[in-house]
Image (cartoon, rainbow, N blue to C red):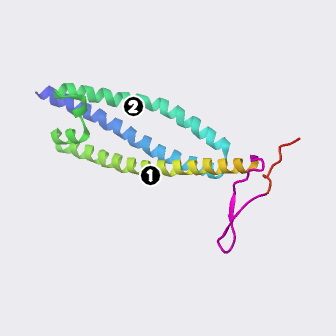
Amino acid sequence: MKAATIEIEDKVDELLEVLDRDIRHIEKSLLWLNELRSSVIKRDDAASGKLIESIRAESDSYKSNELKRQSIRKKLANTLGCNVEQVTLSALEDILPEEQKTQIAKRKDKLRALTEELKKEHLSTALLLSECARFNSILLKSIFSFRKTETVTYNSKGSTKRQNEMALVNLQF
C-alpha cells in the first residue's frame, strides 16, 4: 500500500511538471496570437511567415509533452485501478495529500484561466482574419468586375444609388 502511495505521489510530481509546460505553452500561444494579429494589421508578410514557421516547429516539439501526459494518466489509472478517463485533476485532488492537492488546484485554476483567455484571443484572431478575407474579396470583386458593379452608395439624405460606372480596372488590351 505504501509503495502504491509513493508511486502515485511520484507520478503526480511528474504530472505537475507536465502541467507547468502546458501553462508555458498556452502563455506562448497567447503571445503568438497577439503577434499574428499585429503582423496582419501591419501587413508584414515576412513576420507572419516567420511566426507561422516557429509555431509549427514548436507544436511538433510540444507533442512529446502531450504523450508524456497521456502516459502519466495511464500509469496513474493502473495504480489507482480505474479507467484513464477517470484520472482527472479534480479526481486527483480528492485522493492526494494536502500539499499536492494545493499544487494541483493551483495549476488547474491557472490552466482554466489561460484557456478562457486563449479562447477569447483565438476568436478575436479568427474574426480579424475573417474580416480581412471578406474585405479582400469585396475589393477584388470590385476591381475585376466587368461593367457589373454591384456597389450601392448612400447620399447624405440616406437614399440609395446604384453605381453604373465601369469597374475600376479595364482588363482589355
For residue 67, side relative to residue 135 (left or right): left
Please tell me which residue is depicted at 27% across the width and 30% down the height of the picture: 73
- Secondary structure that dominates the magenta span: loop
Residue range corresponding to the magenta coloring: 144-164
Q: Nearer the viewer, residue 90 or 119?
A: 119
166 vs 161: above or below = above
- Disc 2 marks a residue whose amino acid type is Asn
The disc, 2 or 1, on the residue closer to the chain's N-terminal end is 2
10 Å neighbourhood of mark 2: few (<14), some, or many (≥20)? some
Q: Is residue 161 magenta?
A: yes
Tag 1: Cα neighbours inside 10 Å, few (<14), some, or many (≥20)? few
State the count of labels.
Answer: 2
Spot occupied by residue 126 in the image (x, y as percentages of width and height): 52, 47
Q: Residue at x 53, y 33 (%)?
A: 56
Q: Quadrant of residue 157?
A: bottom right
In this view, the residue in front, 158 or 130, is 158
Q: In this figure, which residue is indicated by the disc labeled 1?
A: 120
Q: Which dot marks residue 19?
A: none
Q: Residue at x 57, y 48 (%)?
A: 129
Quadrant containing the N terminus in the rendered view? top left
Residue 16 at x, y percent in the picture: 31, 38
Residue furthest right in the image: 173
Q: Magenta stretch: residue 170 in it?
A: no
Name the residue tied to disc 2. Answer: 65
